[in-house]
C-alpha cells in the first residue's frame, strides 16, 4: 500500500501533482486550509481515480498548533507514508502575523515544512526509503538571511520575504538530507518554473493584479510546471539522489547562499529555537 501526503493539494501545483500521481498510490492525503477548496479537489481527484483512498485534512499550516494536530492524526491512525510533498506556500505583500504572532511567510513557507517533516520523523511516520520533496523556487536567488531580523520587523518587503523563505527551503533540504541519510530517506527540492496558479491571489490591491497579468503573459501551464514534482516522486533515477535542487527535472546549482552549510546550520538552530518557544522540541 503506497501513501502520499501533499500539502497545498487543493489548488495550483499541489492539486496538479495529486491529479498526476493518483494512479501511483493507494492512499492520498491532501492538506489545505480552505474546506470548500478541499472538497472540490477531492471530487476532482476521485472522479479520475475512483479506487484511490483519498482524504482532505483541513489544516492551517501557518500555525504550529495545527501542524501538531496534523501529525498527531497520522500517528494515532498509525498511517505510514512513502512521500511527503511540502508544497503549501504563499506570498504576503503586507506584513501579516499568524494567530501565534509569527510573520506569515516565514511561518507557512519555512516553519511548516520544517515542523511537519520533523514531527513525521520523530513520530516514525515515514516508511523506509521514504521521499521528502520540498517545493522551493528560483526566487531564492539574490536573497540572504539575517538572523537578527528573520521576520523582517524592521523593513518589510513581501517579495524579499518570499525570496528568503524559498532560500530557507533549499537550506532545509540540504541539512535534512544529511540527517536522514542513515534512514535511507531522500530529500530534494525544486523550482517548478513560473507557473500559472492561484499564487498571490490572497493579496488585495494592485500588486496582486499585476502578478495576475504577469502570469497570464509569461507563466507556463500548471501541467508543465508540475513535471519536476512528479519526476521526483516517481522516477527511479531520482530515488538515488538526495539533498539537491532540481529545475526541469535536472539537478541544478542554486545560489551561493543556498549552498552555505554554515547558513543551513544557523537556520536549523534558529528554527528549533523558534519551535521550542511554542512547546515543540525535537
Ligand atoms: N506559481 C509559481 O510560479 C511558483 C513558482 C515557484 C515556486 N512556487 C511554489 O509552489 C508552491 C505552490 O504554490 P502554487 O503556485 O501552486 O500556489 P496556489 O495555487 O496558491 O496553491 C497554494 C496551496 O497552498 C495552500 N495553502 C496556502 N496557505 C495555506 C495555509 N496557511 N495552510 C494550509 N495550506 C495553505 C493553498 O490552500 P488554501 O487555499 O486552502 O489555503 C493551496 O492549496 C508554493 O510553495 C510556491 O512558493 C510557485
Image: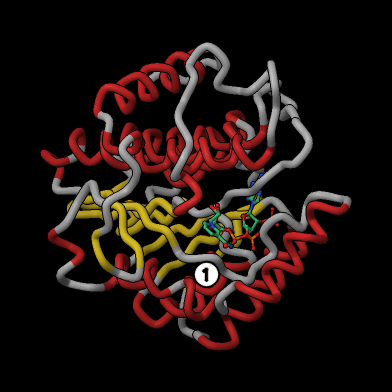
For residue 260, above or below residue 150: below
Q: Nearer the viewer, residue 110 or 9?
A: 110
| Rendered-image quadrant of the N terminus | bottom left
The image quarter containing residue 26 is bottom left
Is the residue at mark 1 in contact range of ligand 1, meaning its CB lies under 8 Å from it? no
Q: Which residue is mark 1?
A: 54
Q: Please give left or right for residue 170 compared with residue 155 in the image.
A: left
Image quadrant of ligand 1 equals bottom right
Residue 201 x, y percent position in the rendering: 76, 58
| Rendered-image quadrant of the C terminus | top left
Q: Nearer the viewer, residue 124 or 186?
A: 186
Count of numbered badges drawn on the protein: 1
Residue 195 visible at all = yes
Q: Residue at x 78, y 60 (%)?
A: 210
Q: Residue at x 48, y 36 (%)?
A: 143
Q: Residue at x 27, y 30 (%)?
A: 260
Q: Nearer the viewer, residue 210 or 165?
A: 210
Q: Residue at x 46, y 44 (%)?
A: 140
Amino acid at each position: 500500500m503506497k501513501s502520499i501526503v501533499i500539502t497545498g493539494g487543493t489548488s495550483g501545483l499541489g492539486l496538479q501533482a495529486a491529479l498526476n500521481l493518483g494512479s501511483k498510490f493507494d492512499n492520498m492525503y491532501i492538506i489545505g486550509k480552505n474546506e470548500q477548496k478541499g472538497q472540490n479537489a477531492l471530487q476532482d481527484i476521485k472522479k479520475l481515480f475512483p479506487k484511490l483512498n483519498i482524504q482532505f485534512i483541513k489544516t492551517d499550516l501557518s500555525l504550529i498548533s495545527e501542524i501538531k494536530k496534523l501529525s498527531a492524526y497520522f500517528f494515532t491512525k498509525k498511517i505510514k507514508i512513502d512521500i511527503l510533498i511540502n508544497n503549501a506556500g504563499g506570498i504576503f505583500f503586507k506584513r501579516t502575523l499568524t494567530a501565534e504572532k509569527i510573520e506569515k511567510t516565514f511561518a507557512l513557507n519555512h516553519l511548516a515544512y520544517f515542523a511537519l517533516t520533523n514531527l513525521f520523523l520523530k513520530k516514525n511516520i515515514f516508511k523506509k526509503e521514504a521521499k521528502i520533496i520540498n517545493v522551493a523556487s528560483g526566487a531564492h536567488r539574490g536573497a540572504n538571511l539575517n538572523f537578527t531580523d528573520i521576520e523582517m520587523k524592521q523593513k518589510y518587503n513581501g517579495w524579499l520575504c518570499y525570496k528568503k523563505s524559498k532560500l530557507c527551503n533549499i537550506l532545509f533540504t540540504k541539512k535534512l538530507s544529511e540527517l536522514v541519510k542513515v534512514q535511507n530517506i531522500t530529500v530534494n527540492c525544486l523550482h517548478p518554473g513560473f507557473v500559472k496558479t492561484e499564487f498571490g491571489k490572497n493579496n488585495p490591491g494592485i500588486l496582486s493584479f499585476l502578478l495576475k497579468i504577469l502570469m497570464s503573459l509569461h507563466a507556463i501551464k500548471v501541467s508543465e510546471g508540475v513535471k519536476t514534482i512528479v519526476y521526483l516522486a516517481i522516477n527511479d533515477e531520482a530515488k538515488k539522489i538526495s539533498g539537491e535542487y532540481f529545475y526541469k527535472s535536472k539537478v541544478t546549482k542554486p545560489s551561493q547562499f543556498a549552498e552555505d552549510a554554515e547558513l543551513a546550520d544557523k537556520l536549523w538552530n534558529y528554527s528549533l529555537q523558534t519551535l521550542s518557544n511554542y512547546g515543540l522540541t525535537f
